[in-house]
Amino acid sequence: MLQLKLMLPLLRKEFLEAWRDRRALIMAVSFALLFPAMIAGGSTFMIKKKAEEVTRVAVLGGAQAPLLTEKLGGPGLEVVSLDDGEPRSLLGQGYHLVLVVGDEFNQRYRDFLAPPLYVYVDSSNTSSGRAQRQLQDRLAALQQLVVTQRLVARGVATQVLAPWKLEVRDVSTPSARGALLLAMVPGLLILTLFVASLATSVDTSAGERERLSLETLLLQPLPAWQIITAKMLAVASLGWLGALMSITALVLLMPLMPLAELGIQQATTLSGVFSMGLLLLPLALLVAVLQILLALRSQSFKDAQTQLSILQIAPLVLLMALDMAQVSLEGSWQLVPLVSHQQWLKDLLVGEVVSLPAMLAGSAVTLLCVVAAVLLGAKALRRESLLSAA
């Protein structure tokens, strides 16, 4: 109990220094609010652009097939019949595709000789692939209609050439569609922990060593583990604050996002935000103590900043790789820090049920890693070479 009382002034000192650093606070708050705004704005722009985008098709030689030109037009597809023009130049004038009808189309069509149609496309245009698929689907539907009419006119049952009818039914749930759209959010939330606590972790370790205040602190009658613990709690408080702000901002911005147009329901509630905050607390402690340990091992303040910048990118790359590879994270994976947190955050964001025993077990493993890191940091503080590293 006496040792804990002696630790209180140290905790007060570390928290005051951390929260008085305007640079660290600005970094934590700005990044915490930046990425939810980017996700909300980006998703809104992408969905509205996709809904409002119209494919423009220029038809050359449309006089040979007036019915084809008339039937091609429809929602999302604007067809313009031109008397002359050069496909390459038309593609540079705002048309996504150029459809060329040959001079002998009408006669060959009447003779059942399958006259060719030529589609000119600029593959360097990012929207050309979507436009080409849209035109091909429309032409295929018209072709099937013509075939059906020819068969009926000759008294042939259409079922002869179509022994079955394929219907595609989407069984995905709103939660599953929401998980696909918000797949990057858990990784960015974890990245927020690293970014929001980076400046404070460097200043409280490598910075104090260069200012020689760490030497004064080590001369105090305090165990080394208490010094590391106090610094860890101060650093983790900023990281955790940034993550909480990000979660809250994202949930508040969800009603403004056009999720309903994709059939996605907002499932995250106040209790979900509370659960995600508690879930990130052990991880915030682990991130903070790892940053402090790495900064203490660095040669200088700038060296610590460089190493921690690399450290904050590495976990995000790992999580993105696992997500893109669609690795099944079951069983013992639920005990691995970062990996398990990403999966739990993804489930909580879309309202999926998360196993409470698995969360408690994974959080316990994370806290054990924190304890091990604190003991390792205490051992590092007892080395005489620590103060001469600068």
Image (tube, rainbow, N blue to C red):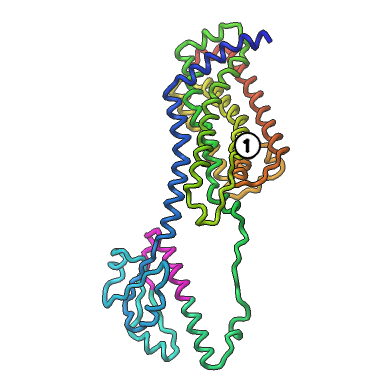
Describe residue 69's horizontal placement relative to residue 271 as left or right. Answer: left
Q: Amino acid at mark 1?
A: Ser
Describe residue 280's horizontal placement relative to residue 390 as left or right. Answer: right
Q: Is residue 311 visible?
A: no
**Mark 1, secondary structure of its residue:** helix
Residue 137 among those drawn in magenta: yes
**Residue in the picture at 34% in, 75% down:** 59
Q: Work out whether residue 117 or residue 49 is closer to the camera in this orientation and state it.
A: 49
Image vertical order of residue 337 relative to residue 321, above or below: above
Image vertical order of residue 236 relative to residue 257, above or below: above
Q: Work out whether residue 172 or residue 219 is closer to the camera in this orientation and state it.
A: 172
- Find the magenta span and give its range: 119-140
Position of residue 171 measured from the top left corner of the image (x, y, whole percent)? 62, 61
**Residue in the picture at 28% in, 67% down:** 89
The residue that mark 1 highlights is 275
Position of residue 338 measured from the top left corner of the image (x, y, whole percent)? 60, 37
Badge 1: how crowded within 10 Å, few (<14), some, or many (20+)? some
